[in-house]
Amino acid sequence: MVVRAFLSEEEEGAWRGLLETHATLVSALDARLLAEHNMPPGSVEALIQIAHAEGGAISVSELAERIGLSPSRASRLAIDLERQGLVKRERSSSDSRSTEVAATDAGRARLLEAAPTFFEVIRERLVDPLDERELRQLGRIWQRLRAARVGSG
């Protein structure tokens, strides 16, 4: 197999496992959140980050970094959430080039409705299949990968 020239069997298994786990989790989140709350997972994740931001507001660029979107995509998401009345966008008082996003009362209410489903799916698909030792090990692996990414620039 051509792939084996680049990845060992163990490396390929780790890569494929990551891709399959991510795809399965995102698909399950998408199906449940849309069916039960008419919200895609990205909107729920954005509202979680916005609601937990220090001071209750977060810059669009910081939101983009936290949820893994490009700044332009995060800006479009913030605009969409604002149109739904879930957030308000305002120019930053400290940097007029930056836009900050804060959850509205309606946004916090929708988040409180959708969050249990969001975390239930994560628990079912990622947490429950692992025992405590495996879960701690997975957490250490993610920390190591995050540190390597941050350390490499």
Image: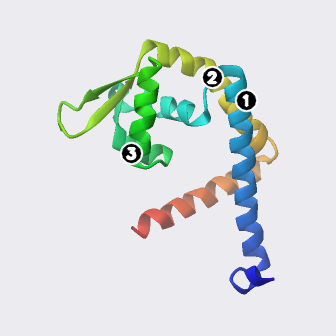
Amino acid type of the residue that numbered disc 2 sits on in the rendered structure: Ala
Residue 42 drawn at (x, y percent): 56, 37
Q: CA distance from mark 2 to mark 1?
A: 10 Å
Quadrant containing the N terminus in the rendered view: bottom right
| Residue under label 1 | 32
Left or right of residue 41, residue 94 in this image: left
Q: Earlier in the sequence, mark 1 or mark 3?
A: 1
**Tag of residue 147:** none
Left or right of residue 113, residue 91 in this image: left
Q: Earlier in the sequence, mark 3 or mark 2?
A: 3
Amino acid type of the residue that numbered disc 1 sits on in the rendered structure: Arg
Residue 119 drawn at (x, y percent): 67, 32
Q: CA distance from mark 3 to mark 2?
A: 25 Å
Q: Earlier in the sequence, mark 2 or mark 1?
A: 1
Residue 26 drawn at (x, y percent): 68, 43
Q: Is 77 placed above or below 62 here? A: above
Q: Residues within 10 Å of mark 2 (few under 14, many from 20)?
A: many
Amino acid type of the residue that numbered disc 3 sits on in the rendered structure: Ser
Q: Residue at x 56, y 63 (%)?
A: 145
Quadrant containing the C terminus in the rendered view: bottom left
Q: Are marks 2 and 1 in contact (CB under 8 Å)?
A: no
Q: Residue at x 25, y 39 (%)?
A: 98
| Residue under label 3 | 72
Judging from the image, what secondary structure is the residue with disc 3 in? helix
Of 35 and 135, the residue lying toward us? 35
Left or right of residue 99, residue 53 in this image: right
Judging from the image, what secondary structure is the residue with disc 1 in? helix
| Residue under label 2 | 114
Q: Is 13 placed above or below 26 here? A: below
Q: Are marks 3 and 2 in contact (CB under 8 Å)?
A: no
Q: Residues within 10 Å of mark 3 (few under 14, many from 20)?
A: few
